[in-house]
Amino acid sequence: MSITPIKCKAAVAWKAGKPLSIEEVEVAPPKKGEVRVKLIASGVCHTDAFTLSGEDPEGIFPAILGHEGGGIVESVGEGVTSVQVGDHVIPLYTPECGECKFCKSGKTNLCQKIRETQGKGVMPDGTTRFSIDGKPIYHYMGTSTFSEYTVLPEISVAKVNPKASLKEVCLLGCGVTTGMGAVTNTAKVEKGSTVAIFGLGGIGLSAVIGAAKAGAKRIIGVDVNPDKFELAKKLGATECVNPQDHDRPIQEVIVEMTDGGVDYSFECIGNVKVMRAALECCHKGWGESVIIGVAGAGQEICTRPFQLVTGRVWRGTAFGGVKGRSELPGFVERYLAGDFSLNDFITHTMPLEDINEAFDLMHQGRSIRSVIHF
Ligand code: NAD
Ligand code: AHE
Ligand code: ZN
Ligand code: ZN
C-alpha cells in the first residue's frame, strides 16, 4: 500500500519576531530511512522562543518550530527497521546513529550524522517534507513538533514504553532530560555537593530535581522572578536567592553564603553575564560551571582567565549529554516507576490554535511549561 501525503494543521513561523500562524500544510510521505509521526503533544521550550525572536544564527523561515514532542509512528519509509507503525516515540533533536565518529567516541552525545542538513532546516536528502501550495516550509531542529504530523529520520526518534502518557513524557524530549542530564551526565554531581542553579524555568527546575536525586546537600536556586521559588523548593532547592535583592554581584553573595563557592553551578537562562556569575561563584580549585542556556548571535562569554587558572572549570551541555535512543527509554521507565514527576512542570495546556499564548505566558514568566495537545 503506498503512503500518501497528509494535509494537516501546523503552526508556521513565517518571519522572525512575528506570532506563529496556524496553516494547513502538506506533509509528504517518509522517504528511505525516515518515519512520519502523528504528534500527540508538544511542550514549548525557551529555545523555540529564542529562534522565533531572530536571535538564532541558524534560524530559518518559514519553518515549523517545536522540539519537545511525543507522538505515534504513522508510517515508515523504506528500510526502516528499528520502529514500526503504532510505536510511541519521542523526537530527538540530538539523534543517535551509533556509527559516526561522535557516537563511537564514547565521549559525547552529539551525533553529527545529519547535523549539517538539520541546521539548514532540511531532511538528510536536502529537501523538506513540509509544503504549502507546493512551496517548501523548513524543518526545525530536525523535529518540527508544532504540527499534527512531522517527518523525522529514523535515527531521530526514541521508542518509549506506550504505557507512558505522551502528554507528559513529551517533556523528556528536551527540558527535563536536559536539566537532569546536565547534573548527572555532564557535571556528575556527587552526594554532599553544594550546587547553584541560575534560572528556575523548565531547565533549571529539572536541574534542581537532578541535584536532589544526586544527594546534593545544598541546592541554591537563583532567579529574578520570586514566583519560581515555591516550586523550586518543592522539587528540592534548599534555598532561593533573588539577585535583585542584593546590591552587589550575585557571585559575591553566593561565595559568601557557601564559604568560598559552590562545587557545581548551572546556567539555565542564556544570559552571558549570568554565565560569568555562575562560573565565578564556583569554589576555587575545583568548582565546575555548566552552561545550558543558549545565547543570541554575536554574544560572547568572558571572565578573567585567572578564574580558570585557579581551578574552576567551564563546560557546556546539549540535551544534558543524554544519548536519546539508548538512554531516553530508561528516563521514561524511571518516570513510570515514580522516580520523578513531570506533572509539576505542566502549568498550562492548550490546543495548537492557542500556541501563541504559550509564548506570551513564557515571556511574562507565568508558565513553567505549556504543553500543546493535538
Ligand atoms: P524559561 O524561560 O522557562 O526559564 C528561564 C528562567 O530564567 C526564568 O525563570 C527567568 O525568570 C529566569 N531569568 C531570566 N533572567 C534571569 C537573570 N538575569 N537572573 C536570574 N534568573 C533569570 O526557559 P527554559 O525553557 O527553562 O530554558 C532556559 C535556557 O536553556 C534557554 O536559554 C534555552 O534556550 C536553554 N536550553 C538549552 C538546552 C541545551 O540543550 N543546552 C536545552 C533546553 C533549553
Ligand atoms: N542554533 C544555535 C544554538 C542552539 C543550541 O545550542 N541548541 C542546543 C539545544 S537547545 C534545546 O532547547 C543544542 O543541542 N546544541 C547543539 C547543536 O548541535 O545544535 C546557534 O547558536 O547557532
Ligand atoms: Zn528545548
Ligand atoms: Zn552518530
Image (cartoon, rainbow, N blue to C red):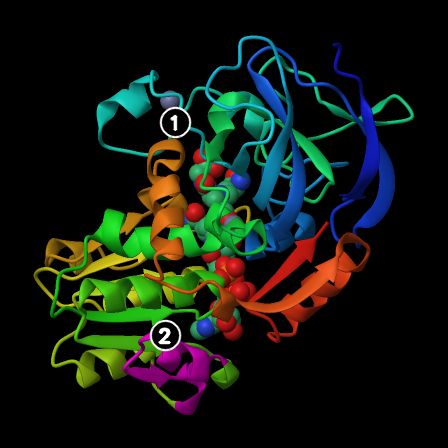
Near mark 1 (Cα within 10 A), the count class, few <14, some 14-19 or many ≥20, is many
Q: Quarter holding the N terminus? A: top right
Residue 202 or residue 340, whichever sits in front:
340
Say which residue appears at 82% left-offset and 36% top-offset: 8
Q: Which residue is mark 1?
A: 111
Looking at the rendering, which quadrant does residue 247 occupy? bottom left
Ligand 4 is located in which of the four quadrants? top left
Which three-letter amino acid code belongs to the residue tagged 1? Cys
Say which residue appears at 36% left-offset and 63% top-offset: 340
SS label for mark 1: loop
Q: Earlier in the sequence, mark 1 or mark 2?
A: 1
Find out whether residue 317 is within the magenta segment: no
Q: Residue furthest left?
A: 285
Foreground label between 1 and 2: 2
**252 vs 117: above or below:** below
Q: Is mark 2 within 8 Å of ligand 1?
A: no
What whole-number distance in Å separates the C-alpha atoms at marks 1 and 2? Answer: 31 Å
Residue 333 or residue 130, whichever sits in front:
333
Q: Which residue is mark 2?
A: 235
Which residues are the magenta region? Answer: 228-245
- Classify residue 268 as left or right of residue 253: right
Which three-letter amino acid code belongs to the residue tagged 2? Leu
Q: Is mark 1 within 8 Å of ligand 4?
A: yes
Residue 288: x %, y % from top left? 20, 58
Q: Residue furthest right?
A: 133
Find out whether residue 240 is within the magenta segment: yes
Say which residue appears at 87% left-offset and 41% top-offset: 23
